[in-house]
Image (cartoon, helix red, strand yellow):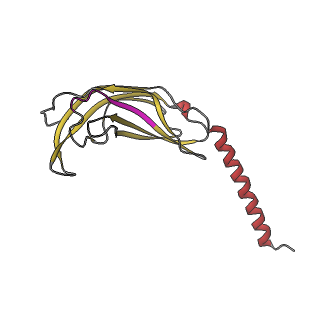
Amino acid sequence: MNTVLSRANSLFAFSLSVMAALTFGCFVTTAFKDRRVPVDIHVSKVMLKNVDDFTGPRERSDLGFLTFDISADLEPIFDWNVKQLFLYLSAEYATKSNSLNQVVLWDRIVLRGENTKLNLRDMKSKYFFFDDGNGLRSNKNVTLTLSWNVVPNAGILPLVAGSGHISLPFPDQYEATKSY
């Protein structure tokens, strides 16, 4: 005869199997959804300084400062399987020493239920835009892209780039002013 513990074990194992099947069903219903939305990025100010780099040999490195605007409606991304979005603005550029440089300039977490319409004006970089040398000066192709990670309730963690980016040139001269 089955004891109470063996019946509880059977019930628990069956419940876990049903929950696993439901979780997989949750994942499958939203796994193939296109999570790209149009993004409008506008840069109003670009400034470049040559500063001491204290992380390595005593050399000077380029430090970029950007003032930018971002507009996007993230509402179509949210469905019942999305818990939050991790947004980040990244800059990509090539230099003589590296064919691909990627720097995250700004980020934000948008939770379900919060305002999903981004209309950010005169934002400044949250993180330093350092180059490990002098690759920003006179660089004619620095591309800014807003991307996001979709954090689901169940399933994989997709990395999505917004359908809109901007390429901008950096100045030929360094700024002499002390303040940003």
Question: Residue most toward the left?
Answer: 176
Residue at image position (30%, 40%) is 98
The part of the chain drawn in magenta is 137-147
- Quarter of the image that includes the C terminus: top left
The magenta stretch spans residue 141? yes
**With 155 as the anchor, is 180 left or right in this view?**
left
Q: In this rendering, is residue 137 above or below 23?
A: above
Where residue 78 sits: x, y (%)?
Answer: 56, 35
Relative image position of residue 155 (x, y in whole percent): 60, 46
Q: Is residue 164 above or below residue 27?
A: above
| Nearest to the observer: residue 79 or residue 38 | 38
- Write down the quadrant of residue 80 in the picture: top right
Is 117 placed left or right of 138 in the picture?
A: right
Q: Nearer the viewer, residue 92 or 163?
A: 92
Depth order, front residue of 7/93: 93
Q: Position of residue 49 (x, y in %)?
A: 18, 36
- The magenta stretch spans residue 5: no
Quarter occupied by the N terminus = bottom right
Q: How many marks?
A: 0
Q: Position of residue 23 (x, y in %)?
A: 67, 48
Q: Residue at x 39, y 40 (%)?
A: 107
Residue at 34% over, 26% down: 167
Residue at image position (37%, 36%) is 90
**Relative to residue 8, is residue 170 drawn left or right?**
left
The image shows residue 120, relative to residue 152, as above or below, that is above
